[in-house]
Image: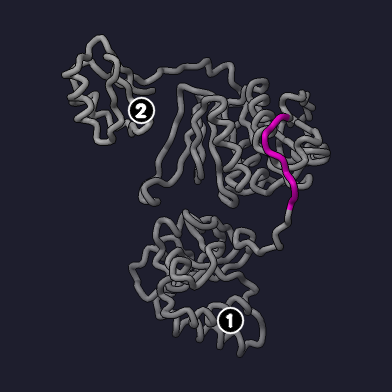
Amino acid sequence: MGLVIHNEKIDRAAAEKLMALCPFSAIGYEGGKLSIGAGCRMCRLCVKKGPSGAVTFEEERRGCDKSAWTGIAVFAEQRGGRIHPVSLELAGKARELARVTGHPVLALLIGDGVGNAAEELLEYGIDKVYLYDDPAFRDFLISPYAAAFADFIEKAKPSSILVGATSLGRSLAPKVAARVRAGLTADCTMLEMKENTDLVQIRPAFGGNIMAQIVTPNTRPQFCTVRYKIFSSPERGEPHGETVRMPVPEEMKAGRTEIIKILKKPEETDISDAETIVAVGRGLRSKEDLALAEKLCSLLHARLACTRPLVEAGWLDAKKQIGLSGRTVKPKLIITLGISGSVQFAAGMRGADRIIAVNSDPDAPIFSIAHHGIVGDLYEVVPALLKKAEEAGHVL
């Protein structure tokens, strides 16, 4: 899609009018020809208010034979031969979506010496694993990985592709989508499948105030990324599929990037993996009062988390934030203290098995998703809870 200039309809007077219209000074006129430069922001004022027919906006109409694209594919991210848990979650979701269309579930695995990982994927309901196994893929380099991914798409022709929204996935998916001229919906929270193989990709929009349903009916493949802990991992079972080893020609390994040295980051605890969480919000009056929540964490063997305002205030690290702009969690138990429960926060923790909310406002939105609610001041509720636990002489 883009702007098309019809110079045969443009004289100097028309050109001057168009140049005056452009708020970005992106239109030029030289040698009797109009041009639109890189400063154009596609506001289309030149189309709407310029001389009739001088500049038009034309959208490319693309179509495809949907029957030529079959299968729901999962990019199986691995590190050191270990499959990332988000890929297993996506495998389970892919199997669920495949029941609607009857398509097979495919997996793309790229790495070096990862044959065992391919066998493991077959135990999670994958029908066919496409394996690109070569020393060139030992470490993640964007160009070789993207080349292998594009080769997989060309040969397997999957209708839909699910990628984990990890740092690697968020780097790789857009590059591959651009290469194969496919759209990409990032950070989906729900996925649905139509019988005609159109994937309904659902994600929060406008700061989480609405849920956008995105469908790309005229192109294949359909690309999306999904955060960790959004879906549940399937049960491990007996393998029933097959592994297809794909050729890795020299041109696939080419790239401009070279890894000189790898420095491992120290191991960090991630709240996404926590089974019990105590989360604090703006109901906390001061940074020093975090000690109250930390004591509750100690009793529950829980991890401390928070809402965005506490991160912005510098009270806690951003890695402890739950929500659309933070982490997605799925603990067995989460206790929220002084959190109103905005849409953005709720989207990051509504998958918890048990939610206990403490808030002094009986109309706080958090109570609409909590399994148990306590209307009261957290400065009274938490000490009372701690006292009961200490009197009982055991951990809660």
Determine which residue is flagged by label 2: 37
Q: Quadrant of residue 368?
A: bottom left
Amino acid of disc 1:
Lys
Determine which residue is flagged by label 1: 295
Vertical placement of residue 205 versus 301, above or below: above
* Residue 229 in picture, x, y percent from top left: 59, 52
* Residue 379 in picture, x, y percent from top left: 44, 83
Residue span colored magenta: 254-262
Number of on-image labels: 2
Determine the secondary structure under disc 2: loop
> Badge 2: few (under 14), some or many (20 or more) residues near its Cα, within 10 Å?
few
Determine the secondary structure under disc 1: helix
Q: Residue furthest top?
A: 8
Q: Residue furthest bottom?
A: 391
State whether residue 107 appears in this view.
no
Tell me the mark number nearer the camera, choosing from 1 and 2: 2
